Amino acid sequence: MISIYTAPDIEVIDATVEGKRAFRESRDASRSSSSIRNWGLQFYALPVEGVEVVLKTKADKPFKMLVVDRSYGLPDLAGSTAKTRPDYMIPTPYGVSDVTLVAKSFTF
């Protein structure tokens, strides 16, 4: 799973993923703007060739985002003393058990 998060101070005006709209309008009639802060996306089963994500933002400051890859399983690390879980044991039932997270932030 790949997650994309914009910085809290970034206002996203519109978003598309592979040409399909990925933007939810606010249902709050008191909001004067149709932009959204804290825009995020979780993409499951990302194709090997990747996808095109287009974000339209206000250009009054640098654009900051965080991309996180979450892969199930733990990497084999040379010199590690961690042992493989026995077959009779299961991971915790929560979504963050036995996962490897790799994150990178970007500023444009």
Image (cartoon, rainbow, N blue to C red):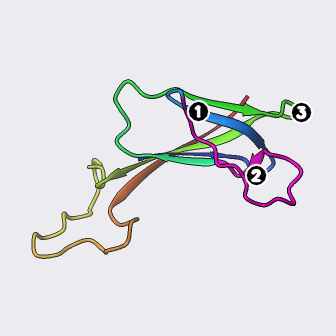
Q: Amino acid at mark 1?
A: Thr
Q: CA distance from mark 2 to mark 1?
A: 19 Å
Q: Residues within 10 Å of mark 3 (few under 14, many from 20)?
A: few
Secondary structure beneath dot 1 equals strand
Q: Residues within 10 Å of mark 1 (few under 14, many from 20)?
A: some
Give yes or no for contact between labels 2 and 1 (Cβ–Cβ under 8 Å). Answer: no
Sequence order check: which comes first, mark 2 or mark 3? Answer: 2
Q: Which residue is labeled 2 in the image?
A: 8
Residue situated in front as seen by the camera: 64 or 12 = 12
User: Which residue is depicted at the point 39% across and 46% down?
Assistant: 44
Residue that extends furthest to the left in the rendered view of this protein: 87
The quarter of the picture where residue 87 lies is bottom left
Q: Which residues are magenta?
A: 20-39
Q: Amino acid at mark 3?
A: Asp
Q: Which residue is labeled 1 in the image?
A: 16
User: Which residue is depicted at the point 76% across and 35% down?
Assistant: 63
Q: Which residue is labeled 3 in the image?
A: 60
Q: CA distance from mark 2 to mark 3?
A: 14 Å
Secondary structure beneath dot 2 equals loop
Give yes or no for contact between labels 2 and 3 (Cβ–Cβ under 8 Å). Answer: no
Vertical side of 76 occupied by 52: above or below: above
